[in-house]
Image (spheres, rainbow, N blue to C red):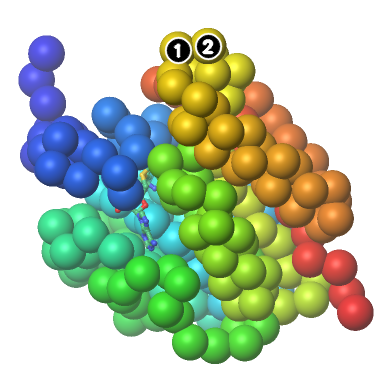
Amino acid sequence: MVLSGRTKTFLAEFRRNFHTTGALLPSGKSLAFEVTKHLAIPHRKPLKILEVGPGTGPVTRIIAKRMIKGDTLDAVEINPAFALAMSELVANEADFAAHRSRIRVIEADLVTLPGNEEYDAIICGLPFNNFDSELVGQMFNSLEGLLKPGGRLSYFEYWAIQTLKLPFVGSKTRQRLRGIGRLTGEIRKRMGGATRLILANFPPALVHHLLKPKS
Ligand SMILES: C[S@@+](CC[C@H](N)C(=O)[O-])C[C@H]1O[C@@H](n2cnc3c(N)ncnc32)[C@H](O)[C@@H]1O
């Protein structure tokens, strides 16, 4: 199998930074289309979009293809190797040309991002199940704080990671995963929205589309 440069970068970062990378391979097209589907609504208004954890950019590419005139995109990435790969991608590839001047790659940790109700849409690829539940809580606080009332938060998690992993891990990890499951379940219940299973991805993923209530 011939691997692209971007896939090699992703694999290298999976080995070097498994904790924050959280996946062996970049997302496939079906997952990227589903998690960005609200950007494809016909005749929509220009939006301020935030992508969290772009990695090597498979989702960013689809966001760029679905952007319209007046949209802006901030892509925030904690890993310097991915942030550099993303900056090069945006600067050089034709898929980004139409909206290049309105796309920023920001090398930062999500939880340090300033701003209050800045974004109309947030698309998030963070590997929540790798973190402790306190950090996951902080991350969702940041995501909700950055989202405007009436805005959408779309994120994915690998399907059945909670149930498949649970029998094979120690009690500490089991407790941690259950805590994250409870926390994210409560957030989904409170915000409301829809979930879709994408089997055509490695690994298969659940995409959650949440809506921040208008106050
Ligand atoms: C599962 S990968 C997803 C990458 C890409 N979106 C995709 O779908 O292939 C998770 C990404 O989130 C980034 N990340 C992890 N923690 C982060 C944080 N606190 N702030 C910003 N990015 C983070 C990782 O470096 C990695 O690029």
Q: Which residue is mark 2?
A: 167
Q: Is residue 108 above or below residue 1?
A: below
Helix, strand or loop for disc 2? helix
- The residue at the point 79 percent across, 66 percent down is 212
Q: Is residue 6 visible?
A: no
- The residue at the point 12 percent across, 26 percent down is 3
From the viewer's side, name the closer residue of 80 and 201.
Answer: 80
- The residue at the point 29 percent across, 64 percent down is 78
Q: Is residue 196 above or below residue 190?
A: above
**Which quadrant holds residue 112?**
bottom left
Residue 156 placement (x, y as % from top left): 56, 41
**Marks 2 & 1, CB-CB < 8 Å contact:** yes
Q: Amino acid at mark 1?
A: Phe
Q: Is residue 23 left or right of residue 182?
A: left
Q: Is residue 39 left or right of residue 201?
A: right
Q: Amino acid at mark 2?
A: Pro
Q: Is residue 34 above or below residue 81?
A: above
Question: As drawn, which residue projects farthest toward the bottom?
Answer: 115
Question: As drawn, which residue projects farthest toward the right?
Answer: 215
Residue 125 placement (x, y as % from top left): 46, 48
Question: As drawn, which residue projects farthest toward the front?
Answer: 171
Task: Characterize the local packing of mark 2: few (<14), some (14-19) or many (20 or more) Cα atoms within 10 angstroms.
Answer: few
**Which quadrant holds residue 113?**
bottom left
Q: Which residue is mark 1?
A: 168
Q: Is residue 178 left or right of residue 95?
A: right
Q: Is residue 169 above or below residue 27?
A: above
Helix, strand or loop for disc 1? helix
Residue 165 placement (x, y as % from top left): 49, 18
- The residue at the point 13 percent across, 42 percent down is 16
**Which quadrant holds residue 160?**
top right
Q: CA distance from mark 2 to mark 1?
A: 4 Å
